Image (tube, helix red, strand yellow):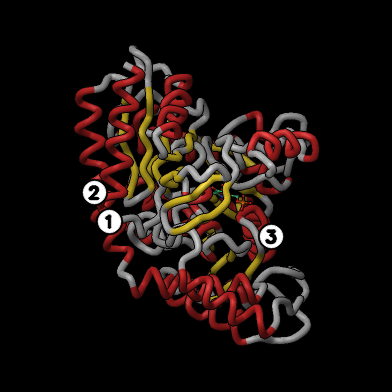
Amino acid sequence: MTTSADIITRNAEVFTPALHIYHPIVIEHGNGSWITDQKGCRYLDFSSGLAVLNIGHNHPKVIEHMARQMKRFVHTGGIYYNETTLKAAELLTSVTPAGLDMLFFSNSGAEAVEGAIKLARYVTGRQGIVAFSGAFHGRTMGAVSLTASSARYRARYHPLLPSVYHAPYPHCYRCPFGSIGNSCTQACQNYLHEMLRSYITPAEIAAIIIEPVLGEGGYVPAPAEFLRQLRQLCDQHGILLLFDEVQSGMGRTGEWFAAQHYEVTPDILIVAKGIASGLPLSALVSRRELMEKWPEGAHGTTFGGNPLACAAAIATIEAIRDENLLQRCRNLGDYAMSRLRDLQKQNALIGDVRGIGLMIGVEMVLPGGAPATEACERLMGICRKHGLLIINCGPERNVLRLIPPLTISDNEMELALTIIESGLAEIG
Ligand SMILES: Cc1ncc(COP(=O)(O)O)c(C=O)c1O
């Protein structure tokens, strides 16, 4: 029988080392919150396949919808209409913030970001784009030009997209201006206004793009006031506000989208990851009035809106709705945050616990506050040894990100927190 070690070795022979795999495990089965590896070991999956499996592995409803679709047809390629893709679009626009009622389906987060850049430039006739430090918007040339969570992702790809400007993200725990509390919001807004005075006029900016909850950059929810002020700034100057909710969307924060927590509606919402429980699907959703300015042929796709992925999306949205998972996410998230904050009081390695719903970041620090990258990696390894899979994020990879499926049971949450607690004790 092929061993896991053999598969991992063969992987290294055929796949470019550019591709990062977080854990040296070969999956054999996935079911709910659990995966089983080749040796029969079970792991509680607190990565949700990188924030994708919001209703767990192999949700029966997803399997059933896909099986039904698979027997009928699996591809249309934009040659003919089909009702499955239509239904997925209707369902998705029924849960996006009010007014965002037209969409374009594509296959990945980065692809939807590219589409959003094109839409914004097309309808405004402007070129400039403002993004934020710490942002992760994807790996394609346009998306990576907006990405600023690590210079490593951009290295050797210059020149990138021109007329892209980055402003500091209001990351209060590590305020770029050394401010405390709300003054961080103000300092970041001031910087942005200075940028519009010194580098690019507002009349040349097509879009401001932001993750309302910073993902890859360290799981940082933006202060509500910052997003409200961004909305005002955009309204004042005819700039489009883009929310990249690839990671924070589809129920992850306890609302369908983080925008709904903040009560700030973007002009374009970017959705991917959790939308189809592991099938490749993404969407950019906008107002009819903007979408109608994008004429036929201005954008397109072969695979976007694939009926199989859309069948999975229908099942996913219905499961989140029918199983009352938004409420469950809020309750479990509150519980986990309070347990983690208690742990923080006893453990100096935990510098900050933050997040919304089940998008929780635990920042690990050394005495004095420097990032504890090595301790974070060690903790991930110890957790794995005890059957819990967690991944990290942040520019220094010292933030543990807890993103379990929204379907996890109370007992599973308890088990994970206990493993983390004993892992921290083991590190000392
Ligand atoms: C906020 C955000 N935007 C965009 C992307 C890119 O998505 P994809 O990897 O599907 O291209 C990611 C991926 O992690 C993300 O977290």
The reply to whether the C-beta atoms of the residues labelled 1 and 3 are less than 8 Å apart is no
Q: Residues within 10 Å of mark 2 (few under 14, many from 20)?
A: some
Packing grade of label 3 (10 A; few <14, some 14-19, many >=20) is some
Residue 118, labelled with which disc?
Answer: 3
Q: Residue at x 29, y 28 (%)?
A: 422
The type of residue carrying mark 2 is Asp
- Residue 152, placed above or below residue 305: above
Three-letter code for the amino acid on which mark 3 is drawn:
Lys
Point out residue 6 in the picture as x, y percentages from the top left corner: 70, 36
Q: Which residue is mark 2?
A: 334
> Decide: marks 1, 2 in contact (CB < 8 A)?
yes
Residue 253 appears left or right of 76: left
Whether residue 237 can be seen here: no
Tell which circle, 2 or 3, labels the residue nearer the N-terminal end: 3
The quarter of the rendered structure image containing the N terminus is top right
State the quadrant of the C terminus. Answer: top left
Q: Residue at x 29, y 55 (%)?
A: 409
User: On the image, numbered disc 1 is attached to which residue?
Assistant: 330
Q: Is residue 46 toward the left or the right of residue 196 in the image?
A: left
Looking at the image, the residue that sits furthest to the top is: 367
Secondary structure category for the residue under label 2: helix
Which of the two discs, 1 and 3, sits closer to the camera? Answer: 1
- Figure quadrant of residue 279: bottom right
Three-letter amino acid code at disc 1?
Arg
